[in-house]
Every structure is written in structure tokens, then in C-alpha cells.
Image (spheres, rainbow, N blue to C red):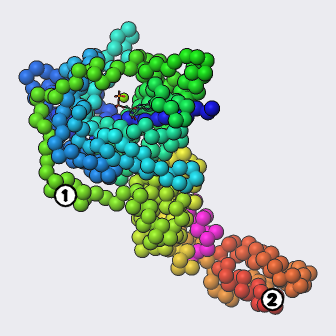
Amino acid sequence: MAWETVIGLEVHAQLSTQSKIFSGSSIAYGAEPNTQANLVDLGMPGVLPVLNRKAVEMAIRLGLAIDATIAPRSIFARKNYFYPDLPKGYQISQFELPVVAQGHLDITLEKGESKRIGITRAHLEEDAGKSLHEDFDGQSGIDLNRAGTPLLEIVSEPDMRSAKEAVAYLKKLHALVRYLGVCDGNMQEGSFRCDANVSVRRPGEPFGTRAELKNLNSFRFIERAINYEVERQIELLESGGRVVQETRLYDPDRDETRSMRGKEDANDYRYFPDPDLLPLEFDQAYVDALAENLPELPDDKKNRLMSDVGLSAYDASILVSDKAVADYFEAVAAGRDGKQAANWVINNLLGKLNETGQDIEETPVSPDQLGGIIDLIKKGDISGTIAKELFEIVWNEGGDPAAIVEERGMKQVTDTGAIEAAVDEVIAANPDKAEQAREKPNMAGWFVGQVMKATGGKANPQSVQQLVRQKLGIE
Ligand code: ADP
Ligand code: MG
């Protein structure tokens, strides 16, 4: 009998606040070590944490977006463990009563069918500092800039059954936090990181023992790490071994996971309510006001693009998959034909970005510029072929599309007199082909091609088509 993979994911999303969750220090990335750590972050005796209202707001917004229950009363707890970069000896987190519980996210599987993934909880907590091992020979440095950075830990149900499903869930969640503006999603800087819990079982049997793959920070590595781990567990079980509950690290260079440490159970942390913080309480009016102000979310946007603009499910899902892409598309489509805008964004812009390995944020062609190109096609100033050339020019050199067309004489020839002359010339130069075309009308295409060539692609294709048929006497 085959094995079934079971995956549950824990995502740590760094909230996009200005300051830390319990202190006024900045959370900006990349500062000199220990320049953004104040007495609270250093865990000095006698100081008290003060909760950041914005962090709470962001947690609730995420909760609303995943249709979760927002707890009107939740509490902060101390999770006790020793680590050199955790000066207090405990992390402030939420345990029994998280602010967000019982939500879900729908993912789209390969064949287009949808699957609902449960989200057990999302709780607020503080990040720890960082131990720096590289720059110090035989010693470690401690940087407490990250200590106290607000995190939302989003814990899924063990509902995923393959690495692909896990990646689909993560991409969806990643897009969602960016739409909501609660997390910048920067995976390189660790603003959005994932622990994958992986086990295997025979279908129908109880869940197997899980291994936790820690701190995966790229979609590609997550997929590979899970696939490797599944193979490892299956081999182990089939050779009579047992999976132990442990934390493992993925090594991308060797494409394998290695044991890091045994995995504690929750009761090993001796959680208890933090006596320094009051319970977190708010009323329904406060939650309702936040709900009112949610932006249009990816699923709603996708549905709207399909029903109002008439895009296919596939095209719509590409455009909504990333907030920056969606914003770009909407800017191009405003006041223009939505389908045409979608085609240009997907086939030309995203195609080119893919080719050059750039992000939408780095695009050299702005929505205004691309919109300008589309307007020129609409006005009949340029053909689709010239538009592609123009796109290349704008991509490489920048500039205003209309001005470029003017300056470089790229305007389409709509003057029928000029086109007529070119048609006459081509027919005169190819009398035998003209004879054949009168017999076989689809030969007319060859003449159209020749005339387009003779006019440097600038003749209006419809006029050429019409004139060629007319002059050859084809109906
Ligand atoms: P911990 O902090 O100990 O990792 P959490 O409750 O925060 O515990 O997270 C547990 C995660 O592991 C959840 O995402 C859950 O869905 C997942 N999980 C639990 N049991 C299994 C299992 N047998 N196989 C795979 N994933 C599991
Ligand atoms: Mg965990």
C-alpha cells in the first residue's frame, strides 16, 4: 500500500509596524548590531512591556481575511527557554487564548480544483535576537536588534498532502499578508518564514510522528525539503525504523535535511500567563471597523476580473497572485480595454520580467508607459507588431511612447494612397505569383507580407489586406 504525506505549516510573518511589539525601538532591517535595542528589548529588570496597538490591528485584519474567530479576550504567556539571544529567558507569546483561531484558506490545485486548508490559530509574539557566528573567530556575537520584533505565528491544520499543496498554501498566504499590508513578505530578510511539519502514514491510519523542518525561506527550498523528508521517512519506516519527533534543518547545497535537536512538547516550555501584561480585550465595534476597512482580497479580485473584465480563471489568477502585479494591472487597465491590458501585462511585461529574472518592482516600463503603448494601438497609430518593437525600446531606453513613435517615424501608414502604391509595386514585380493568387485566394497573404515588409511594418494591416484583395480581384 502507498504512503500518504501529511503536512502542517507554521508561518512566522513579521508585522509591518514601525516599532517593536512591546517597546518603541525601530524594527527597520539592516541597522548596525544593537543600535535598535532598548531596555525592554534587552530584558532589563524593572522595565515593563507596552503592547503595540498596530500589531494587534494587523493580527485582527489577517484573522478577518481568513474568516477566523477573533477572540474578544486573549492573553499573553511566557514561553520559557534559555537561548543566548533571548535575554529575558522567556519569549512573550500567546498560548491558550490566541487572538485569532479557526480560520481557513482555499488553495487551487493543479487541475484547477479548490481545496480548503484549516488554520488552527494565529497568535502574536515577539521575535528573539540573532546569534552571529560568522564574523567572530571562536566566539559568537549577539545582535538584539531583532529582539521584540512583532510576529504573527500562523499555524495550519495538518491538511496538506503534498509538497505542492504546501507551496500553494504558502504562496496564497504570502499574497494575502501583502494585500493586507500586514507583512512585507520579504523572505530573504526573514520577514516571512516557514516551519514545515512532515509525517507519513498508510491512508486511513492515525497520523505518524512528525519531523519539523525549521526556518525555510524560499518556496523552492520548501518544496525540495519536504520531498526529501518524505522520502527519508518512508525509507526509514520501510526498513523497520521509527521516525522520532525532532527539529531538522534543510541544507540546500546538499539537498538533504539533518537533525538539529529533539523537539520539545508544549509542556516543556512551562507556559504561564505574563503578569506584566493585561489581557488583550476589545469590543465588536472595534473589530467591525477593521473589517470595513479591509482592501479587496485576492479571491474577490480574481472573481471580479473574471466576471467584470471577462478574463479566464487562469489569467485572473496570474494577475492577483501578487499584490504588486495586481496593482500594476489595475493601473494599466484603468480607462482601457481590460482584456487587452491583461494580455500586455501577462504576455509582454511578465514574460519579459521572467526572461530577465526581475521582479515587478524593478520593471523599467511603468504602467503609464505600457498604457501609452496600448493607447497608440487603439488610436490606430501603430500596429501590434510595431507596438512590440516600441515596448522593447521603452524597456531599454525609457521615454514617452507617443513621442518615440513621432520622433522615429514609427507611425502606421493609414494613407491609402501610399499603401496603394506599395501594393501596385509588389504586384507588378511578381506577375506570376499574382496570377496564382487569383486561382488560389489564400496566396494573398504572401502579398500582404511583402507590402508590410516594403513599408517597414508601418502600413495598417487591414488596409493592406483590403487593397491586395481588391487589386488582385479576389472577393
Ligand atoms: P509546535 O510549536 O510544537 O511545533 P504547534 O501546535 O505550534 O506545535 O504546531 C504544530 C504544527 O504541526 C501544526 O501546523 C500542525 O498542523 C502540524 N502537525 C501536527 N501533527 C502533525 C503530524 N502528525 N504530521 C504533520 N504535521 C503535524
Ligand atoms: Mg513548531
Task: Indicate the secondary structure of the residue bearing disc 2.
Answer: loop
Give the amino acid at mark 2.
Answer: Ile
Image coords of residue 199 (percent x, y) = 49, 29
- Specify the segment rendered in magenta: 381-400
Specify the label residue 121 is tagged with.
none
| Most distant residue in the right direction | 432
The reply to whether residue 198 is visible in this rendering is no
Split into quadrants, the picture shows ligand 2 in the one at: top left
- Whether residue 397 is in magenta: the answer is yes
| Most distant residue in the top direction | 138
The reply to whether residue 354 is visible in this rendering is yes
Task: Indicate the secondary structure of the residue bearing disc 1.
Answer: helix
Where, by quadrant of the figure, is residue 377 drawn?
Answer: bottom right
278 shown above or below 380: above
Residue for point 19% across, 53% down = 287
Tell me if 284 is positioned left or right of 219 in this view. Answer: left
Which numbered disc, 2 or 1, marks the residue that appears first in the sequence?
1
Q: Which residue is mark 1?
A: 289
Number of other residues with Cα within 10 Å of mark 1, as a class: few under 14, some 14 to 19, many 20 or more: few
Specify the label residue 474 is tagged with.
2
* Quadrant in the picture for the C terminus: bottom right
384 shown above or below 238: below
Image coords of residue 157 (percent x, y) = 39, 39
427 shown above or below 260: below
Image coords of residue 119 (percent x, y) = 36, 43
